[in-house]
Amino acid sequence: MKLIYEKELSQIFIGRKVAENFLEELEAQIETGFGEFEYECTCNHKNIVNGMKNSLKNIFFKLNLLYINLQKQDLVGDMEFIYLSFLRSAILTNSDVYQLNVYDRKGRSSTVECVCRWDCIEIFQGFYNLKRNIETRFRKQMKINEYVLDKRLIELGETMNEIAKPFIIDAIKQLAEDEYLWEDKLPVIMIGEFLDKSDEIIGGANGILYNETGH
């Protein structure tokens, strides 16, 4: 039984076995749903990446326009970094789950905001379908508080983020070859936690990609 359930179960004296059985069945449903989803992702890798390329391309164009406007106001220098971060709390409200922030050479120390949200629906539609089924089943019982479900959904969202990452990385690497996006200078693109640990997807200057050491 998952740890997030233990505290809740410890407070249930009457009908504990019923609650335990319900949670075991719920977890079985989750595992089955995730297994089916991962299989579909494996079979449709190319289509998912192509879908992401199209939606991300629109996001990058929008960011470029926003950034150009900031440059015209002399608020920022040349575009140097794009950070793509996962928004955990967004999964509870079915909001856009990723945020893209753009910076000049000051990086995240800059006080000027240039940001767009992205739904990553190519992956997270599968999550929302599973989430809807879980919520429907969970609300048919009365013993376990709903905050327990929220904690489990956030955990599931983090797992979904890990599933999405390699698809996102492939899509961005392919987009980096599009000369119309960043002309002769490719920004360093990072993915991870906003204002925390991030991994470099790709980056470069004057049209030359960085090597693995970042130079």
Image (cartoon, helix red, strand yellow):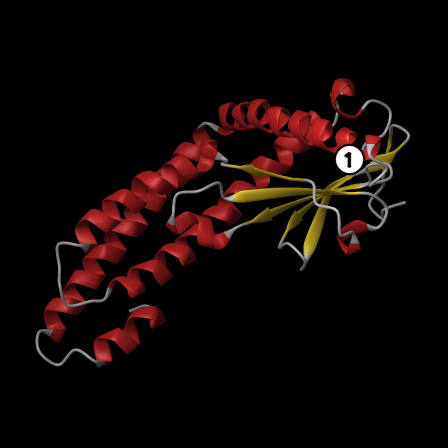
Tell me residue 157's x, y (percent): 43, 51
Residue 126 appears in the figure: yes
Residue 13 in the figure: left or right of residue 200: left
Q: Which residue is mark 1?
A: 70
Image point (87%, 39%), residue name? 77
Tell me residue 71's x, y (percent): 82, 33
Of the 4 image quadrants, the one containing the C terminus is: top right
Tell me residue 164's x, y (percent): 52, 41
Image point (61%, 24%), residue name? 58
Kindly give the residue lying farthest to the left in the view shown: 14
Element marked by disc 1 = helix
Within 10 Å of the Cα at label 1, are there few (<14), some (14-19), or many (20+) other Cα atoms? some
Q: How many marks?
A: 1
Question: 3 or 82, which is in the foreground?
Answer: 82
Residue 177 in the figure: left or right of residue 38: right
Q: Amino acid at mark 1?
A: Leu
Residue 160 in the figure: left or right of residue 188: left
* In the image, residue 114 above or below residue 51: below
Question: 10 or 72, which is in the foreground?
Answer: 72
Image point (41%, 40%), residue name? 38
Image point (80%, 36%), residue name? 187
Tell me residue 97's x, y (percent): 50, 44
